[in-house]
Amino acid sequence: MTEIHDIAIIGGGASATLLAWNLRHRHSRGCVVIDPGPQPALGLAYGTRSVENLLNVPASGMSALADEAGHFLGWLRRKIAPEIGAGAFIPRAIYGLYLQDLFRQAAPLHIRARVERCAPDADITTLHLDDGRCLRARHVVLALGHFAPPLLPGIPADLLESGCYHHQVWAGGVIEAIKPTDPVLLIGSGLTAVDQIMQLRAAGHSGKITIISRHAQFPSRHAPAPKLDAPVIAPGACAPRCTAYLHLFNAALKQGIPWRACIDSLRSVTNQLWAALPPQERARFRRHLQRRWDVVRHRMAPRIAEALDAGLASGTLSLRAGHLQKIEAVADGLRVTVRYHDRIEILHAAHVLNCTGPSLRYDRVNSPVLRDLLDRKFARTGQGGAGLDTTERGQLVASDGTARQALYTLGPARQGTLFESIAIPEIRGQAYDLATTLDGLLTQAPLQDLCA
């Protein structure tokens, strides 16, 4: 008979690592982690090897443990350098080493395979792997992390194989394919674009980089700000409407409170405020306010902001508002058609990089296990098709609105229900809570009871 595991985690990135660590160190429970990657714990975010890709939060805010705020800073001072300050912005590659250390401490059974099918049945779920094996588990957690960005319009199929258009900028060999003086065009101006700019310059690229996005805005920069005693928008303090939230936020600004302090004060209540909004108000926020929020919420390290400012001032960087219309291969590279409000412009580039960020449309991503769960109605997407619909505990909601199966998720997938669910502070809290939930369920129904 196939062995029955208590907990199986599908995915091996940061979310899986934090959950496995909490299970082991808070509840003395092991688990199995199923992920095909050779280096678990890194995922898409922390697999970079470039020291120019910095965390966008100071070291003091990047503890992976919900109840030990100084854990990462202490690890840095023990493992890297004792003089590292709380406000330092650390390379993401070093944070990846930190996560790998936590993964080793958690010591899960790591199975290098991909789950293609997930079959819940009564108290046991059977996982069918791509190598032909099957694994049985009492509780299954999807920790799938981020997926490749959505396909851009106007991209012919043959361009994907040209080596000049790069759909997945984190794939190996992208930076290496670009010559030092090649003109490069980036689609999108968020943190993904910032990372690519810094990697290109670190690799010796000196050519012109043009960045095209709808709003032509880089993320704001970090700067000192006072810590407020209470959020500037308290849950229940006003009607659950975007305009009411904006009114309170603007009132705080008029009182002289710095905008960074206002934004940071909301971190602990953002998901509560979001949950209170009716669906039509959430859709309104996504349409009109999402980009403005992203610019001020997800900030850059000061050193990176200074480098971008210098590039813009010298003309080696160009940030422009526009919409991509199409890309065509021509003799000397790529011909890019961009629409700016009432006019069309033709740009030429040797390489185009898709920097629009990860896809949240889980009904469209390339994941066999997600497709299987959605097709067989064991799961459904969240509002607007983003992520997955879940309960407050992270349990998957089926297509009929029930949550009967022992299937859970955490991290980016929970953006189908939550507003904030991709940053370490949110993920570490979810990992802590989910580990406690799973331990409680297993304590109530030990394996011997199941097998009796």
Image (cartoon, rainbow, N blue to C red):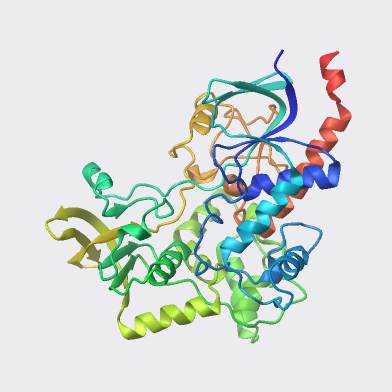
Q: Is residue 89 left or right of residue 21?
A: left
Q: Is residue 272 visible?
A: no
Is residue 217 placed above or below 14 in the rendered structure?
below
Q: Quadrant of the N terminus?
A: top right
Residue 325 lies in quadrant: bottom left
Front-most of 198 and 439? Answer: 198
Front-most of 334 and 282? Answer: 334
Measuring from the top left, give residue 324's x and y in whole percent: 27, 59
Q: Quadrant of the C terminus?
A: top right
The residue sitting at 55% across, 68% down in the picture is 54
Q: Is residue 270 left or right of residue 106?
A: left
Is residue 329 placed above or below 372 in the rendered structure?
below
Front-most of 400 and 396? Answer: 396
Measuring from the top left, give residue 211's x and y in whole percent: 33, 68
The residue sitting at 76% across, 57% down in the picture is 65
Q: Is residue 224 left or right of residue 218?
A: right
Residue 230 lies in quadrant: bottom right
Q: Is residue 38 visible?
A: yes
The residue sitting at 48% across, 68% down in the picture is 292
Disc tally is 0
